[in-house]
Amino acid sequence: MGARRLRASLKGWGGVGAMAVACALTAVFALLLPLSGARGDGSTGIGGQGVGRGTQAKAEECTDPQDQSLTPSAVSGATIEAIKNRKDPRLIVGVDQNSFRWGYRDPNNTESGSDLEGFDIDLVHAIAKDILGDENAVQFRAIPTNQRIPAIQQGKVDMVVRTMTITCSRLEDVAFSAPYFETGQQVLAPVDSTVKGYDESLADKKICTATGSTAYDKLDADKKAGKLASTADISTTVPNQLDCLVRLQLGEVDAVVTDGALAASQAAQDPTVQLKGKTFTTEYYGVAMKKGADDLVRRVNRVLEDYRQNGWRTAYDKWLSATLGADSPSSDPPAPKYK
């Protein structure tokens, strides 16, 4: 069955792209270009001397992580000035290059060639336009799922815009903007699978998640609490979420749990898999930045204030409406709340 499913999924760009990506994922992060004009300690200058520590809530004080960001401001502080004063003044942003309609390279798009495109990429361009006056003043860096937080903490990027859920535990390590997208965890499985959703049908099934993802955290917590079948095998974790789709295509796992917004795009690429059941969590994507980079956080929030009114819906209709629907729960930007 696994081989038959794989042959079907390899028809068209989606399956081929997934397989090619899987072979290259282990090398992606190592091949990233060094920073232009970086300091000797590898820092980008964000959160450096003269920048106060972030004031976002600690996990023990946090109940609604999506409401913990700082109020918007157009004022440039030490972080933004350091970006502007680089020898090569570009925004360095960690993104995905393999998530269909979010951040990916479409080889069939002769106009953009190998340029990154997608919903998250459009947002990055809007941020660069506001901060640097040029939407193309961006250096994109492909960041695996499990390297998002280290990349920020180690100063490899100024921010990560990569379908990254705002959580209380992550707020201990990085700062987040206000939310820019609402989604939830969902199950992806073969069309002919007996899996029906996030329920007892996952018993005795092997489930794949990305290392460091909220999907794995949810499965692990639910299994310990007895809310997930004790025979469900959640031991398969991968560096990049797309690797789970490849495992599913190969028949190595029975199901994938990930954000519904990402799963819908993967189902659009591969007609042999489909979403099973409804979303079973509510999560919000945010732009992640270094703790202490308060002026950058506030500036991104100011950009988002305008983007929700002028740009967000256009991007949704262009990239996500075909897979999520024009009137889905995700089809409007979440209303921001600040500390």
Image (cartoon, rainbow, N blue to C red):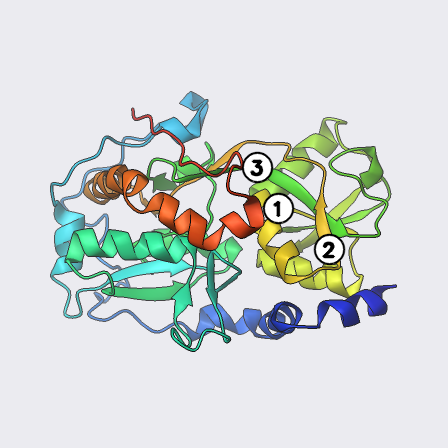
* In the depicted structure, whether residue 184 falls above or below residue 88: above
Residue position for label 1: 258
Q: At 56% across and 74% down in the image, what residue appears?
A: 24
Residue position for label 2: 273
Is residue 212 visible to us here? no
Name the disc covering residue 74, or none: none
Q: At 60% across and 60% down in the image, what residue appears?
A: 242
Q: Position of residue 89 (x, y in %)?
A: 17, 65
Q: Position of residue 318 (x, y in %)?
A: 43, 54
Considering every residue shown, the one lying at the far front of the view is 326
Amino acid beneath label 1: Thr
**Secondary structure at numbered mark 3:** loop
**Badge 3, how many Cα within 10 Å: few under 14, some, many 20+?**
many
Q: Closer to the camera, 293 or 215?
A: 215
Earlier along the polypeptide chain: callout 2 or callout 3? 3
Amino acid beneath label 3: Gly
Earlier along the polypeptide chain: callout 3 or callout 1? 3
Question: Pointers 2 and 1 in contact (CB under 8 A)?
Answer: no
Q: Is residue 118 left or right of residue 87?
A: right
**Secondary structure at numbered mark 1:** strand
**Secondary structure at numbered mark 2:** strand
* Quadrant in which residue 230 is drawn: top right
Point out the frontmost of discs 2 and 3: 2
Name the disc covering residue 184, or none: 3
